[in-house]
Structure formats: C-alpha cells, structure tokens
Amino acid sequence: MGILKIIFGVLILIIFGVVEANASDQSICASDRTEEHYPDGSLKSCVLKDTFSANGIKCNSKSQISFYENGRIETCVLAETAKVSGEECKELEPISFYPDGEFKSCVKK
C-alpha cells in the first residue's frame, strides 16, 4: 500500500509540474516594476523576473508579458527560438497567442 501512495504522489507532482502557471501567479513578476491587473485582480501584464515557460515556449526574463483575462498568455518575448504550429519563431522577438491559447503570430526565423 505504501508504494502505491508514493507512485500516486509522484504522478501528482509530475502532473502539476507540467501544468502552466497562470496569470494569477504574480510571483513571476519583477518586484521593482509596475504590474497591471484586471478588475478581478488577476494579472494583465508585468515585466518577468525570470524566464517563464508556458504554451511550449519560454518567455524571456526582464521582458514584458501580457495575459488575457482567462489567464492565458497574450504576448511575450521569446527567450529562445521556438517551433510553434509549424512556424520557427525567432528568439528575443515577440510571440502572440489567441485567448484560447492557440498560436497567433511571431517574428519568423
């Protein structure tokens, strides 16, 4: 029975480890910069303190990131080259998504 609890615990950690952080997690923002919030208090935009991973991409630290009201990324600056929906997007350039999380646009490499 103990081994099943360990396996279950590891699975929970794996599942939550791959779930993307959402805009309500304001700890992603640099503390010395201004944050914008929606009326409900959820994060609208800020400057990232560290690299932020979501939607299969990495957003660059110390760059602006914005979110839709549903918590999904609207736009950010790529930390590294990324291949999204068959498009190769250039690092250190903006990438955008639709409110449902689908890829919208980027600067092509």
Image (cartoon, rainbow, N blue to C red):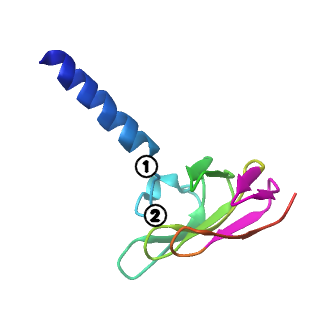
Q: Could you say whether the residue bearing mark 1 is in a helix, strand or loop?
A: loop
Q: Could you say whether the residue bearing mark 2 is in a helix, strand or loop?
A: loop
Q: Quadrant of residue 1?
A: top left
Left or right, residue 4 beside residue 21: left
Q: Residue at x 30, y 37 (%)?
A: 12
Q: Which residue is mark 1?
A: 19
Q: Which residue is mark 2?
A: 23
Quadrant showing the C terminus:
bottom right
Q: Quadrant of residue 106?
A: bottom right
The residue closer to the viewer here, 4 or 19, is 4
- Residue 35 visible in the displayed image: no
Residue 99, given in percent of the width and then of the height, sits at: 53, 75
Left or right, residue 56 beside residue 106: left
Residue 92, given in percent of the width and then of the height, sits at: 80, 55
Q: Residues within 10 Å of mark 1 (few under 14, many from 20)?
A: few
**Vertical placement of residue 105 versus 7, above or below:** below
Magenta part mainly helix, strand or loop? strand
- Residue reaching furthest to the right: 109
- Residue reaching furthest to the front: 86
**Amino acid at the residue labelled 2:** Ala
- Separation of residues labelled 1 and 2 (CA atoms): 13 Å
Q: Residue at x 45, y 68 (%)?
A: 71
